[in-house]
Image (tube, grey):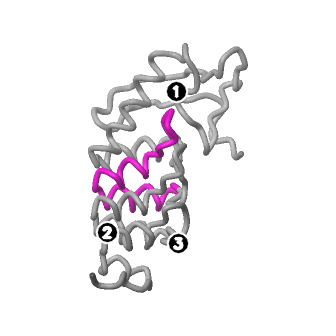
Amino acid sequence: MQSLADDVRFRSFPEDGALVSLEKRLTYGEDSLGGLLTADSRVPVAAGADPEAEEFTGRLFELARAGDTRRLVGYVDAGVPANLANDRGDTLLMLAAYHGHPETVRALAARGADPERANDRGQRPLAGAVFKKEAGVVRALLDAGADPRAGSPSAADTARMFGDARFLDWFDEAAPPAG
């Protein structure tokens, strides 16, 4: 794993410019991660995690759900991992995709968020976007390199299941038989 920082340090929050410093170590049970925040960090990492860290990361996930691209990428640009995931494995990109925010998806992907990363249930952002019929998000994920045939069910399987010929055409897949 690539280390992004020895500690979580944010010197200012983009939404209000207030000078703050959050220097907390994430722990997993009794084993400290030594303050190491990696590209694959997940939070909260254990029962008893620091409440301030949990509150902060909760705000990040809410920004992704709300599609607040400017504020969210401000944090990512300040050092928050682009692939940060919650306790269910949902990444910032997955939450933005599922809630219909193509510009947030594009901005996170441009900063290294993995459009292929599945959550703990094996769900991928592209299949979720197809399920929700979020055409702008589907296009953003395809542009970012998401594979419509990856996963089970894949995005192509999902489009076939719901008879969505538009997405199947985008995926260069055969449409389901009429009937």
Q: Is residue 40 magenta?
A: no
Query: Residue under circle 1?
Result: 44
Residue at 61 percent of width and 43 percent of height: 40
* Amino acid, disc 1: Pro
Q: Secondary structure at mark 1?
A: loop
Residue 15 percent across, percent down from the top left: 29, 36
Which circle's residue, 1 or 2, is located before the other in the chain? 1
Which circle's residue, 2 or 3, is located before the other in the chain? 3
Quarter where residue 61 is shown: top left
Residue 154 percent across, percent down from the top left: 49, 65
Establish if 102 lies above or below 14.
below
Q: Secondary structure at mark 3?
A: loop
Quarter where residue 3 is shown: top right
Query: Looking at this view, is 12 or 123 the one in front?
Result: 123
Boundaries of the magenta span: 85-113
Q: Label 1 vs label 2: CA separation?
A: 35 Å
Query: Residue under circle 2?
Result: 162
Q: Is residue 103 magenta?
A: yes
Query: Looking at this view, is 165 or 50 the one in front?
Result: 165
Specify few, some or many for label 3: CA neighbours under 10 Å numbering under 14, 14-19, or 20 or more. Answer: some
Residue at 71 percent of width and 24 percent of height: 34
Residue at 49 percent of width and 37 percent of height: 88
Specify few, some or many for label 1: CA neighbours under 10 Å numbering under 14, 14-19, or 20 or more. Answer: many
Q: Nearer the viewer, mark 3 or mark 1?
A: 3
